[in-house]
Image: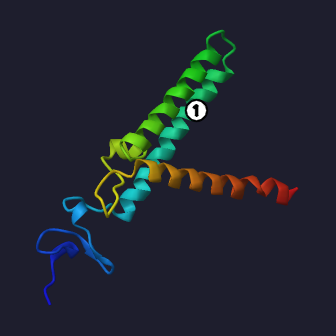
């Protein structure tokens, strides 16, 4: 029995208990620490945008609402572009991390978006039901 570094076949294809995946040869899996760092950086970016919007919306100027809406739309479009076309979070773009399908080697834009949508819906239901329980 041969042992290959990083669970690779002689051709360089990654393997696991279920089989070999030649489509993702050349990609390096993200470590758990890097995944956590990407989520934390994403939270910081979202918090910074939220803080900026809070500052903009509390201003009693004629420009505050149109500028706030424009900043919100730009952030939403950048986030959707990153998910669909780059298959990454916004922080993942900065940290050069993309989500790839192990069977085909193609970017997972649509399924990554659905995964994030389901996680957001679950979090919304989980945290949204708390006031009803506490009341």
Placement of the N terminus among the 4 image quadrants: bottom left
Q: How many marks?
A: 1
- The one of 59 and 66 positioned closer to us in this rendering: 66
Along the horizontal axis of the image, is 108 left or right of 57?
left
- The one of 96 and 57 positioned closer to us in this rendering: 96
Which class describes the residues within 10 Å of circle 1: few (<14), some (14-19), or many (20+)?
A: few
Q: Residue furthest bottom?
A: 1
Quadrant of the image occupied by residue 102 = bottom left
Residue appearing at x 64%, y 53% in the figure: 121
Along the horizontal axis of the image, is 112 left or right of 130?
left
In the rendered view, would you say 127 is above or below 48?
below
Q: Residue furthest right?
A: 135
Residue 19: where, in percent of width, then height? 28, 77
Whether residue 27 is visible here, answered yes or no, is: yes
Q: Which residue is mark 1?
A: 51
Residue 122: where, in percent of width, then height? 64, 57
Along the horizontal axis of the image, is 97 left or right of 120?
left
Quadrant of the image occupied by residue 51 = top right
Whether residue 90 is visible here, answered yes or no, is: no
């Amino acid at each position: 029995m041969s042992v290959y570094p990083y669970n690779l076949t002689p051709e360089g294809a990654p393997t696991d208990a279920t089989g070999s995946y030649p489509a993702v040869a050349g990609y390096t899996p993200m470590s758990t620490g890097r995944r956590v760092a990407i989520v934390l950086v994403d939270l910081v970016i979202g918090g910074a945008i939220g803080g900026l919007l809070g500052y903009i919306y509390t201003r009693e100027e004629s420009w505050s609402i149109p500028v706030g809406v424009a900043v919100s739309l730009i952030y939403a479009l950048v986030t959707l572009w990153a998910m669909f076309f780059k298959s990454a979070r916004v922080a993942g773009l900065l940290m050069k991390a993309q989500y790839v399908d192990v069977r085909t080697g193609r970017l997972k834009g649509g399924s990554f978006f659905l995964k994030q949508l389901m996680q957001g819906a679950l979090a919304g239901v989980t945290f949204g039901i708390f006031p009803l329980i506490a009341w």
